[in-house]
Image: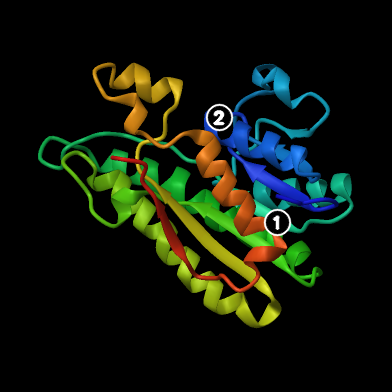
Amino acid sequence: MNLQGKKIAVTGAFGSLGLDVALAARKAGASVACIDRVSAQHVPAALSGAAIFADVDLSTPAAADATFDAVSRKLGGLDALVNIAGSFRWEKVEDGSIDTWDFLHNVNVRTAFNASRAALKFLGKQSSGRIVNIGAAGAIKAGVGMGAYAASKAGVAKLTEALAEELKDRHITVNAVLPSIIDTPANRKDMPQAEFDRWVKPQQVADLILFLLSDSASAITGALIPILGRV
């Protein structure tokens, strides 16, 4: 995939999927700003040479605004945003807590909203801006213990659709990818008896994201694209 000369911001860039997306985008020729809430001392070594923005709480509008102002200055503009920042909790409703619902809404929906809104003043200067959000297959069909997580990711899906409609006449596309279980070290640790070969690989998700960032995807907006592997 050719992203030569593109300027791309990736949130949640220090995690497994974020790291793969950031590295793949750089390999495809893009300049990448890597944004994460994790402190700078935990920046993956593979991101050496990238524009690093650590200790950023994107659930705070002021922090999002300040960060994207800095990103635009560092990269010399902005062509695309990939919203990967987020989290997961498994919890049944019956013995669960509203705190879990608030937490997941905060880290999954609120961060995507704040980052998108802060990025728009820079994306709007381009002839073909891009926003790609990370949803979840559970937003379509939730299972046991997935209520809070699936509800937050359904929020991401509806944010994607609404923002796509809002921006379509400005030539800014907004899409979401909806993975099933991603084959990460954390998921393997949490589900050691699972059949890992059935899960979606982070690189497969990254490949789909890079396509949506490319010129080839200019006609696609408002799409919620499942990427399920064999789950």
Q: In this view, does 97 lie to the left or right of 217?
A: left
Task: Name which of mark 2 and mark 1 comes first in the sequence.
Answer: 2
- In the rendered image, residue 150, in percent from the top left (x then y), is placed at 30, 49
From this viewpoint, is residue 52 visible?
yes
Q: What element carries label 1?
A: strand
Task: Determine which of the numbered discs, if any, sits on residue 59 in the image.
Answer: none
Residue at the spot x=55%, y=50% of the render?
A: 208
Residue to which mark 1 is pinned: 80
Residue at the image point whose x is 57% and y is 42% from the top: 206
Instruction: Name the residue tied to disc 2.
Output: 15
Q: Which amino acid does label 1 sit on?
A: Ala
Q: In which quarter of the image is residue 122?
A: bottom right
Task: Locate residue 151, reporting x and y percent.
Answer: 30, 53
Separation of marks 2 and 1 at Cα, in angstroms:
19 Å
Q: In the visual, does 124 lie left or right of 156?
A: right
Q: Dot 1: within a 10 Å radius of its alpha carbon, few (fewer than 14), some, or many (20 or more) residues?
A: many
Residue 85 appears anywhere in the view: no
Question: Can you say whether 136 is above or below 220 in the image?
Answer: above
